[in-house]
Every structure is written in C-alpha cells, then in structure tokens.
C-alpha cells in the first residue's frame, strides 16, 4: 500500500488565499498561480510514485556499512528515488541561480519540500548539495564562488559536521583541530559523530563536508571555531575534475530507532594515514556564525518535515476512520445500535479534529515564517520592512522547529490510536512515522535548545522588537473580527495573547532580577520549554482563525461547490475547536509560571 498522503489544496490555499504571494513584487514579475499549482501537482505526482516507493523498504532493509572500505551502501530502490528527485531538478528549486538553481521565493521552496518530506524524508536529506552550495556562495571568497557552482551543479552530496562525542548541544566543546599548511590549506584532525549522509556509496561522485574545527591556538568555546570545506575526493575546482581520496573516512554507521534510510555516520578526519585537507570557508574565522546559516536552513527543514509526516499520518488515520466499522452510535443505543464507522464515535472525532487543527495550523505557521524569508513576500503578508521580516523569520524558527516537532510526535500518537491495534503493526505506516518523526525533536538542536534560542536570542537580544511587531499585528487583526460566528474564537485568541503578555512580563522581571541574583535565571530556564509550547499554541490558534476568516468570506459565494464548502466549513470548525478546547490551557501554563520556585534546583541530586 502506498503510504503517501498530501493536501495540495491546503498548501495552495495558504499560498494564495491567505498569504497572497501572487501579489508580491518579485524580480521576475509576480508569481503566476497556475504555474505554482502545476509545480505542486507535478511534485505531488512524483512524491506519490517513485519518491514514496522506497520509503517502507529502505526502513526494513536500511543502508549498510562496510568497515573495510569505509563505505555506506544504500538500497537500490532508495537510490532510484533520490535520482528521480535530482534528475527532475527539484533539489535545485529555491537554490541560487549561480549554483545552477531555479530561484523561487522561500515560501514556495518550503511548500514544495513538504511534499517530498511527506513521501520520503531521506530522499530530501541526501539531495542537499544545491542548498549547501547556495549558502556557501554567500560566504565564499571571490575564488571560492566558482567552487560553489561546481558543488551545486555536479552530482555531489553534502553534509554539515558539528557534533562530537563530547560536543552535542554544547557545540563549543568541539575538539577537532585544524592545522595550517604552507600552501594555505588546513589539515583537519578529529572524530565527529552523528553525521547525516556522510557517505552514500556510489550515489554521488563526491561529497563535500562543511566542518567546524578549531584552528591550532584558537580560543576555547564557540568563538574559537572555524568552518572548513573538506571534500571526500580532492577536486580541481576550476574544471570540477576529481582527484585522489582525501583523508576523511566513515568509521561507523549508527543503528537507530527510525529514519533508517538516512545514514547517520561517525566521520574520522586525518586518522588513517592520509591528511584530511580542508579549506577555510570565506576569509574570516567565524565558523559558528557561518554554520548557523546552514543550521537555520536545517531547522526549517525539520519543522517542515514534522508537519509533512503529521499531515500524512492524519490523512491516513482519517481514511481508516471512514472505513473501519466498529461499535454502535452512542446516541442510538450504543452497544445495541447498528455498527458504524469509527468516525462516528465522539472520541475519534475529537482526536481527528485535534490532529487536523494542528496539521493545518502548523502548516500555516511554517509557511507564514517562510513568507518572512523574502522581503517582497513579507511586505505583502504583514507589511514588515526587510529587517523586521528577517527578525520575524528568526523568531518563528525555533517555534516552527521545536514546537512543530514536539506537536507532530504527540499528534502522530493520536493518529496511531485511531487505527487501534492495527496501528501498532507494520501493515500501516503510523508506527514508522512515529519512529521517523521522533528524531525531529532531537537533531538540529533539541527542544530545550530551541526554547532557549527563542527566549534569549530571538526575544531578549532582539529587545522584543519582532515579538512586539507580531503581537500588535495579531491584535489589530483580532480587533477586526466582529462577525458573530468568528468573534468568540477571536476573543479566546485575544485572551491567550494577554496570557502570553503576562508570561513575557514575568520572565522579563525574573531575567532582570537575575542581574543581581544569578539564581533567578533558573526560573526562566525552568519555564522556557513551557513558553515555547504556549507561543506555539497561540500562533496555531491565530493561523487557524486567519484561515477561518478567509473561509467564511468564501462561503458567501453562491458558486462554491460541495467540496469547497466542506473545505471551508472544516477550516471554521477547526479554528473554533482549537480556541475553545486547546487555548484555555495557556491560562494554566501562566499559573504554573507564577508558581515556579527554585525548590527544584535546590533539591539534592540524590533526591531525584
Ligand atoms: C539521526 C541523527 C542525525 C544527526 N545529524 C547530524 C548532522 O548531520 N550533523 C551534526 O553535526 N550533528 C548531527 N546530529 C547530532 C544532533 O544535532 C545532536 O544529537 C543534538 O544536537 C543533541 O546533542 P546530544 O545528542 O549530544 O545531546 P546532549 O547535548 O547531550 O543533550 C542531552 C539532553 O540534555 C539537554 N541539554 C543539553 N544541554 C542543555 C542546556 N544547555 N540547557 C538545557 N538542556 C540541555 C538536551 O536538551 C537533551 O535533552 C544528528 C543526531 C542524530 C541522532
């Protein structure tokens, strides 16, 4: 059975009816709706066919490692899926034209990514070289600009290489060294772990690793790290011709819970008698800032992947609920009543509507965030100027990634529950979805790290500017909702926004107190993840209301057909349901913040 399910109509609704991206002034003229929809439909077709084809099989027969040759070999059908995606040019959509890409607004790039990520996330993960090349291009020296083109236009793979055994969340603890050479190159020495796609056998002609390492004599911590480009095979960057093997070798392939098709490798530099030659990226030793461009892109990928899998999980559960006959209707005698499809049971409906609300709210959120990654699109969506647009995108990123991942994991559990015992079997995709989605809350910064990023970097360091802009924009929109069916929903969201304001003030007060009494910062640390969740729920509620407002207007049109009517009614119902049944918990969260004390920090370790 093909596991793939998608909702292209909802993606198009977001892009055009809600965000209005066709009104954005692009360099090459406005985005034509029919072209965009044709792109979505074409990738959807490919995703449903050859891309999804290896999803299940490569979980059951995952990549294998040969320690003698330091090679990871991928299953043939997985390679076929990746090649189909690459050969059709999709990996280049959104990449810089100077590296062979087709430039489109980021919001469209991520909308397209959702489809391949729902079908087979590992395919997307092997095909990242055009994106890496685009990022490298922005950081490269004049000479390296040509290298970026070679990376983007050749049949290469790429990786980002930060993590070590003793340097996970604490990136600055990395020990991998970089030793300068007389010819301007560097020799990299050390062992990295958990590196995605570090080898893929004969899938690619070469792999370029972007590696964080510490130049000899550089200071400790993140500030002493630099970014190096280390190819698997040496290369003549003027012609693209490949040379000798470089001294970077995979020394282990992790055996893991899910996402098995994506190879997670230990990678050794300069440990096998051949130097691992690297080149400093750009002209400055500013490694963490440089790799952050890659990390931010990867965090957006994770948030989009989480929504993609959740959407497929929900749609699978919905189909099952319509066909599985079990039990009688509660209102017609229950046990003695005629059997009904489980979709008729209140608890199943509650679960499905909660899933729908989160799927569609989170999809709207990642697209809203992506819309702020291009100034012309942001100008249409919120009127933010370019620097505010960038600040909004920055602020939303940890929510898209951290809250998106955690929510998808929780909601996929709900989707599995709809299948009853069958959900636990490999006959249906839910058990694999749950295993494959679990990683989203871990890599590219765990949820705790996302929560701290949101509070300390994106709100406090930004002096609340992006938060203030977005809150004022939200409030102005809520004030305009006066139609009787939607007004109570808007009022509940306005109440949730006030609860967030109280939390903001409380956290800010504690941060200020921490200047005098350092322990007060623990109170903020204790509530950071709760704050991330509260912000996520508020934003999902608001996104759903925006959809409901557009839907309510659309329903007035007498030409709306029955499918469209159902679509719009579903939007309005999801917004009301979420505001009534989920958002009230923000008041409970606010109360828990008020009750936070240092007791937990003073509890002796032995008492845990
Ligand atoms: C499948 C997979 C693929 C990966 N791909 C890559 C890759 O391609 N490249 C790469 O460089 N890395 C990669 N990683 C590494 C990944 O980014 C790290 O695993 C992740 O950042 C967490 O680091 P850690 O595993 O060392 O956990 P730790 O840092 O040891 O964290 C353990 C726990 O402590 C918490 N914690 C740690 N520090 C803090 C803190 N300061 N405040 C609050 N809580 C904290 C964490 O939230 C977590 O719950 C991958 C990992 C996996 C599993």
Image: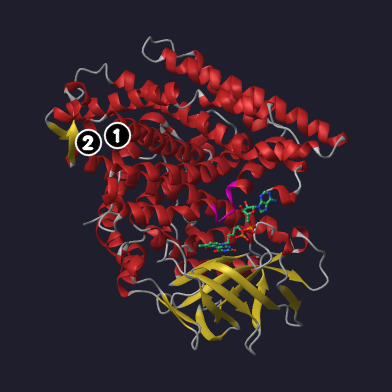
Q: Is mark 1 within 8 Å of ligand 1?
A: no
Q: 213 or 145, which is in the foreground? A: 213
> Would you name the residue on which mark 2 appears?
342
Residue 41 visible in the shown view = yes
Residue 446 in magenta stretch: yes
Residue 521 in magenta stretch: no
Q: Main secondary structure of the magenta part?
A: loop
Q: Position of residue 443 (x, y in %)?
A: 55, 56
Secondary structure beneath disc 2? helix
In which quadrant of the rendered view does residue 589 lie? top right
Q: Position of residue 403 (x, y in %)?
A: 52, 41
Which residue range is magenta in the image? 442-447
Secondary structure beneath disc 1? helix
Marks 2 and 1, how far apart at CA: 7 Å
At x 74% / y 30%, what residue is drawn?
A: 508
Q: Compared with residue 307, is residue 333 higher up or lower down, i.e. above or below?
A: above
Q: Compared with residue 181, is residue 430 higher up or lower down, i.e. above or below?
A: above
Is disc 2 in contact with disc 1, using a CB cutoff of under 8 Å? yes
**Crowdedness of circle 2 by 10 Å Cα count: few (<14), some, many (20+)?**
many
Q: Position of residue 214 (x, y in %)?
A: 74, 69
Residue 105 visible in the shown view = no
At x 37% / y 37%, what residue is drawn?
A: 355
Image-based side of 463 in relation to 81, left or right: right
Q: If the picture is divided into quarters, which one holds ligand 1?
A: bottom right
Query: Which image quarter is the N terminus in?
Result: bottom left
> Would you name the residue on which mark 1 appears?
348
Q: Is mark 2 within 8 Å of ligand 1?
A: no
């Amino acid at each position: 059975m093909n596991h793939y399910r998608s909702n292209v109509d909802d993606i198009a609704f977001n892009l055009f009816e809600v965000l209005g991206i066709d009104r954005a002034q692009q360099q090459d003229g406005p985005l034509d709706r029919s072209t965009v929809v044709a792109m979505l439909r074409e990738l959807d077709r490919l995703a449903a066919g050859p891309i999804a084809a290896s999803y299940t099989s490569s979980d059951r027969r995952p990549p294998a490692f040969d320690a003698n040759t330091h090679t990871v070999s991928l299953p043939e059908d997985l390679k076929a899926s990746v090649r189909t995606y690459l050969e059709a040019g999709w990996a280049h959509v959104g990449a810089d034209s100077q590296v062979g890409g087709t430039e489109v607004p980021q919001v469209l790039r991520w909308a397209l990514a959702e489809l391949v990520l729902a079908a087979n996330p590992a395919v997307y993960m092997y095909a990242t070289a055009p994106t890496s090349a685009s990022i490298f291009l922005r950081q490269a020296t004049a000479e390296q600009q040509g290298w970026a083109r070679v990376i983007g236009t050749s049949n290469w793979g790429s990786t980002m290489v930060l993590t070590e055994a003793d340097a996970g969340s604490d990136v600055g603890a990395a020990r991998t060294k970089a030793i300068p050479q007389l010819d301007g190159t560097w020799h990299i020495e050390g062992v990295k772990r958990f590196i995605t796609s570090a080898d893929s056998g004969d899938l690619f002609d070469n792999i370029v690793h972007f590696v964080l390492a510490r130049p000899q004599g550089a200071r400790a911590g993140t500030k002493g790290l630099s970014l190096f480009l280390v190819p698997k095979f040496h290369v003549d960057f003027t012609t693209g011709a490949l040379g000798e093997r470089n001294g970077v070798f995979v020394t282990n392939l992790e055996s893991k819970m899910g996402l098995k098709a994506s190879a997670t490798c230990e990678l050794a530099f300069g440990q096998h008698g051949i130097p691992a030659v690297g080149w400093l990226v750009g002209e400055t030793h500013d490694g963490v800032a440089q790799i952050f461009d890659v990390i931010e892109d990867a965090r957006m990928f994770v948030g989009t992947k989480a929504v993609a899998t959740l959407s497929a999980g929900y749609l699978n559960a919905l189909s099952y609920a319509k066909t599985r006959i079990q039990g009688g209707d509660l209102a017609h005698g229950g046990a003695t009543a005629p059997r009904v499809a489980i979709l008729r049971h209140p608890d199943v409906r509650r679960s499905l509507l909660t899933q729908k609300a989160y799927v569609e709210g989170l999809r709207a959120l990642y697209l809203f965030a992506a819309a702020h990654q291009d100034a012309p699109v942001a100008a249409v969506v919120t009127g933010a100027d370019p620097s505010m647009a960038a600040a909004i995108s920055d602020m939303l990123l940890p929510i898209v990634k951290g809250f998106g991942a955690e929510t998808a994991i929780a909601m996929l559990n709900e989707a599995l529950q709809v299948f009853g015992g069958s959900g636990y079997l490999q006959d249906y995709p839910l058990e694999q979805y749950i295993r494959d989605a679990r990683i989203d809350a871990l890599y590219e910064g765990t949820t705790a790290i996302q929560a701290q990023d949101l509070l300390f970097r994106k709100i406090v360091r930004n002096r609340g500017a992006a938060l203030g802009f977005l809150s004022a924009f939200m409030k102005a929109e809520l004030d305009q909702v006066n139609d009787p069916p939607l007004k109570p929903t808007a009022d509940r969201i306005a109440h949730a926004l006030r609860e967030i304001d109280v939390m903001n003030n409380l956290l800010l007060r504690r941060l200020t107190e921490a200047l005098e009494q350092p322990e007060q910062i623990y109170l903020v640390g204790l509530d950071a993840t709760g704050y991330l969740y509260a912000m996520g729920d508020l934003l999902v509620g608001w996104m759903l209301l925006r959809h409901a407002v557009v839907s309510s207007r659309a329903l007035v049109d007498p030409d709306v057909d029955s499918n469209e009517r159902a679509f719009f009614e579903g939007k309005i119902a999801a917004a009301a349901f979420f505001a009534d049944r989920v958002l009230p918990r923000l008041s409970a969260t606010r109360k828990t913040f008020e009750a936070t004390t240092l007791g937990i920090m003073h509890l002796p370790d032995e008492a845990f």
